[in-house]
Image (cartoon, rainbow, N blue to C red):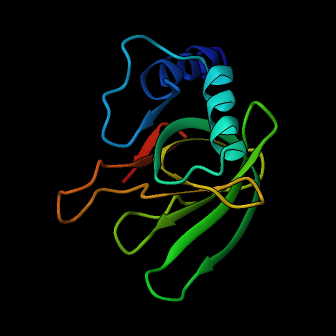
Amino acid sequence: MKRYFPLLLLVIVVIFGVDRLVPTGHVAPAGVVSAQENTSEIGQAFRNLASNVQVRGRGTVLKVLADDTRGSRHQRFILRLPSGQTILVAHNIDLAPRVPGLSKGDVVGFNGIYEWNSQGGVVHWTHRDPDGRHAAGWLVQGGHRYQ
């Protein structure tokens, strides 16, 4: 199994790790955008104080936070992007399954909405829209998709 892990990881990255920034209401450009380009664009969104931006990328868990239990419940954790920027992920666990056993150092792919804040930003809407009016988001960890 250990011999096949790098190959399995490569397959997961190819299938789920395509990184690109997609403005809300626009179609993503054709082609693959690298993680470095993606984090550069997320960095630009941060510098421009941009919000309501559809983003896709991946990062390494820096810290797992306590769930936010006020209103809809959210699993929360901080990701460090390849650029070094950090973002908070707020994953609605009333609408999507929790990412089980998440811990520091885990790599997590994400697709959701970026909202600016002074600490690097927040990604939310990492789930399906129960009303079907919003682009579906997701998290990927350990080869499993949570949405």
Where residue 15 appears, as percent x and y from the top left, is: 42, 22
**Up/down of 69 relative to 131, above or below:** below
Q: On the picture, is 119 further left or further right than 31? A: right
Label tally: 0
The quadrant in which the C terminus is found is bottom left
Q: Quadrant of residue 108?
A: top right
**Up/down of 71 relative to 61, above or below:** below
Tell me the residue at 20%/57% (across/down): 133
Q: On the picture, is 130 further left or further right than 67? A: left
Where residue 35 appears, as percent x and y from the top left, is: 63, 23
**Up/down of 45 relative to 19, above or below:** below
Where residue 41 appears, as percent x and y from the top left, is: 62, 31
Q: Quadrant of residue 81?
A: top right
The quadrant in which the N terminus is found is top right
Tell me the residue at 77%/31% (across/down): 83
Q: On the picture, is 124 further left or further right than 29? A: right
